[in-house]
Image (cartoon, helix red, strand yellow):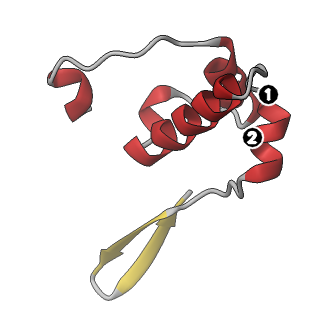
Amino acid sequence: MEHFVAGFRFLASEFVLGAMGRFNLRFHQMNASCFTKLSIYAWASKSQGVEADVEGFVYTHRVHPQPRVLEEDETSIVIA
């Protein structure tokens, strides 16, 4: 969120939209490192003269959900 407040913007390329669709993600569910990894992969692909591919990204990166844990009165509540 801070990135947008500061005025940073990015183009929603087919690759980024495809990756988000593959994992059923929305922008608010992604953190800065997600965008960094997607950008690095897209840049590396383009610098080699190939189109960035979602399946190639999935193959080279391990993607998994990271649930939040809220602690309340000595009990843990996991929110997925």
Is residue 48 or residue 27 the one in the foreground? 48
Question: Which image quadrant: the C terminus?
Answer: bottom right
- In the image, residue 78 lies at what x, y percent? 50, 68
1 and 2 marks in contact (CB < 8 Å)? yes
Question: Which image quadrant: the N terminus?
Answer: top left
Please determine whether, in this image, residue 63 is positioned above or below residue 42: below
Q: Can residue 25 be seen in this view?
A: no
Is the residue marked by circle 1 packed among few (<14), some (14-19), or many (20+) residues within 10 Å? Answer: some
Residue 49 left/right relative to 27: right
Is residue 50 or residue 4 the one in the foreground? 50
Residue at 70% across, 29% down: 45
Please determine whether, in this image, residue 51 is positioned above or below residue 37: above
**Residue of label 1:** 53
Is the residue marked by circle 2 packed among few (<14), some (14-19), or many (20+) residues within 10 Å? Answer: some
Residue 16 left/right relative to 79: right
Residue 76's image quarter? bottom left
Alpha carbon distance from label 1 to label 2 = 6 Å
Residue at 27% across, 83% down: 73
Residue 14's image quarter? top right
Residue at 64% across, 26% down: 47
